[in-house]
Amino acid sequence: MLHPSLVTTLERFILDQEREHPDATGELTNLLYDIALAAKIIAAQIRRAGLVNILGAAGSVNVQDEEQQKLDVFANETMKNALNHTGRVCAMASEEDETIIPVPEGVQPGKYTVLFDPLDGSSNIDVNAAVGTIFSIYERRSASGQGTLEDVLQPGRNQIAAGYVMYGSSVMMVYAVRGGRVHGFTLDPTIGEFLLSHDDIRIPPTGKYYSVNESNFGRWSIGTQRAVRGFHGDDPARLKGKNSRYVGALVADFHRNMIAGGIFMYPGDRKNPNGKLRLLYECAPMAFLAEAAGGAATDGTRRILDIVPTALHQRVPLVIGGSDDVDYVRTVLIESGADE
Ligand code: P6P
């Protein structure tokens, strides 16, 4: 058992970090607390999911035409309620909402926008596999008042902070602030606190795992097929073969690569040239973390953080993980050219 004096809570860690930035107002600190609180509430509900029969679809469908699980709806409302009365946010955006989410009447809009996927991988809920919450924080661009689409449609390189919460065998919150490193906190349910468990997470340049849904292999471009065959070990001169791991939840597949090293891909294909993952609240926050951890993230060839969004729910292909592994994919795709 760790001696209490050795335990660093998320609260203490964020405050220590804030002290390193003399111009900090404390608003970002409080915003991260708000998100951590929402994570604890969502985690508690997920833990009870099998018991209170809230599994199964809520009957409604979200803007992605995906059947909404009850926990999806709960997680979305929890994130909105944790953020919208704080005066720290001028607008939010969620995978579950078609348009941007204004702050309630009577609440002074703040200087940040928060974008989130409230329950990523929700199809894993009914089979008790890992799911997660992904969040991305920007400073507003408009001068004042309710936030606008201009405040939300920013390139990922503008992010002030980003992170995710993974509801797995334990609950972990992983985040980074601009210019900082990536840190992981594990929830101790006996005291309800996130405790620093992974200080300064680094992704090795090349890793032992690759994650991609190979059932789409027949629809990929020649270049994508070549890159994945390289992961299989078919290109030994340039890349050591890797082990396949695929959970089907971005947070879980990405987290494994952050901790154990590896690469994740959700490529475009003939049916969906932009792939499946959303730029603003899946790819951009994960790309922010990957780069802060020494890794890389592209859409195959372009840096994810440089892509300027044009629509709230736009999708982009994603290649993310160790910098050498991501470069390998870029090289193979460029070599393969337009061999579609
Ligand atoms: P597929 C979950 O639905 C999700 O949005 C991501 O979390 C995950 O990486 C991906 O879709 C899985 O998609 O097509 O492999 O089931």
Image (spheres, rainbow, N blue to C red):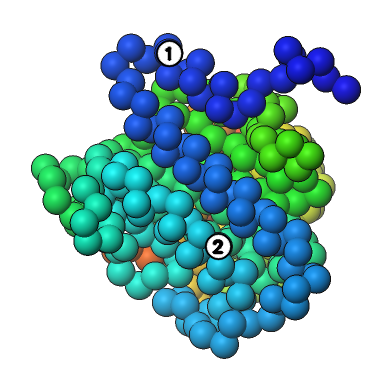
Front residue of 114/26: it is: 26
Q: Residue, x 55% and y 42% (percent of image)?
A: 36
Residue 101: which quarter of the image? bottom left
* Residue 134, position as x, y percentages in the image: 53, 51
Q: Residues within 10 Å of mark 1 (few under 14, many from 20)?
A: few
Q: Residue, x 21% and y 56% (percent of image)?
A: 106
The image quadrant where one finds ligand 1 is bottom right
Front residue of 103/219: it is: 103
Where does the N terminus fall, quadrant-wise?
A: top right
* Residue 30, position as x, y percentages in the image: 42, 34
According to the picture, the residue beneath numbered tag 2 turns out to be 75
> Is 169 situated left or right of 212 in this image?
right
Per the rendering, the mark at residue 19 is 1
Q: Residues within 10 Å of mark 2 (few under 14, many from 20)?
A: many
Instruction: Provide the secondary structure element on which disc 1 rests.
Output: helix
Ligand 1 contact, mark 1 (Cβ < 8 Å): no
Q: Residue, x 74% and y 14% (percent of image)?
A: 6
In the image, what residue type sits under mark 1? Arg
* Residue 157, position as x, y percentages in the image: 35, 37
65 to 280, vertically: above or below: below
Ligand 1 contact, mark 2 (Cβ < 8 Å): no
How many labels, in total?
Answer: 2
101 to 51, vertically: above or below: above
Front residue of 270/323: it is: 323
> Is 148 situated left or right of 53 in this image?
left
